[in-house]
Image: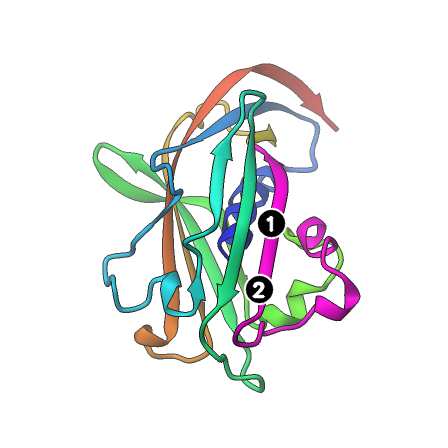
Amino acid sequence: MRQVIFYLLVCIIHHGATLLSVETYSYKIEFKDEDILSKCKNYPKNFLDKIADIKDLKFIRMNNDTIHVKGKAKMTAELPKNTPIKVYGQIYKKSRGQWVNTIYNFARPDLCTALFTPGEYWSKMVQQLSIKRRQCPFPKNYSLNFDLFTDLIANDIVDKNGSGEYKLNANFGYGTKEDEFICVNIIFYATRFDNTRLKV
């Protein structure tokens, strides 16, 4: 789950480009916290550790602008099987000390339907699971072992002034009450580097 959230972050930024013929830019992503995930304002009510043991999952920054995701995540809670799991997220940018909305966001009313749909943000990651292990929701005691590398470069971004501090606020849940949702934040910095190109 933790790696899914991180992968969403990179993909959401990447898919923010338009299909028109415009100049696009590349950005390097760096995280504010070594553990990547930070708590929402209502912690400890609905942090990720309420449903999964993630203490053995490590994120190791490599020298070639990639991050090595290594370790194990284990489900510790049983989620309802017949109730759709909702997922939504919004990326905010810090401006004059305040978090303001950006155009980068996502929402899926039924995560289990979207999880195995080709062309989704997370499709490449899900394809690494064997057919037998493609379950949703993941049952209690289900373990995911990670040993993969993820690029920390976001290409084809149309905003030439996108450098700055950002926050991804991601929420998962199966009900309508606030305490039924899992909420995590990821604080990161995006820095533009000289890789301008024409996208058609």
- Residue 129 is inside the magenta segment: yes
Residue projecting furthest to the left: 97
Picture quarter containing residue 15?
top right
Q: Position of residue 46 (x, y in %)?
A: 32, 67
The residue singled out by tag 2 in the image is 143
Residue projecting furthest to the bottom: 82
- Local packing at callout 2 (Cα closer than 10 Å; few below 14, some 14-19, many 20+) is some
Picture quarter containing residue 155?
top right
The residue singled out by tag 1 in the image is 146
Q: Residue at x 67, y 51 (%)?
A: 125
In the image, the segment drawn in magenta is 123-151
Question: Of helix, strand and loop, which one carries label 1?
Answer: strand
**Three-letter residue code for mark 1:** Phe
- Local packing at callout 1 (Cα closer than 10 Å; few below 14, some 14-19, many 20+) is some
For residue 157, side relative to residue 97 (left or right): right
For residue 40, side relative to residue 20 (left or right): left
Q: Position of residue 66 (x, y in %)?
A: 57, 30
User: Front-most of 20 and 24?
Assistant: 24
Question: Of helix, strand and loop, which one carries label 2?
Answer: strand
Q: Residue at x 73, y 63 (%)?
A: 117
- The relative height of residue 72 versus residue 104 in the rendered view (above or below) is below
**Three-letter residue code for mark 2:** Ser
Q: Position of residue 79 (x, y in %)?
A: 50, 79
Cβ atoms at labels 2 and 1 below 8 Å apart? no
- Residue 107 is inside the magenta segment: no
Numbered label tally? 2
Q: Position of residue 16 (x, y in %)?
A: 57, 40
Q: CA distance from mark 2 to mark 1?
A: 10 Å
- The relative height of residue 52 versus residue 121 in the rendered view (above or below) is below
- The relative height of residue 7 versus residue 165 in the rendered view (above or below) is below
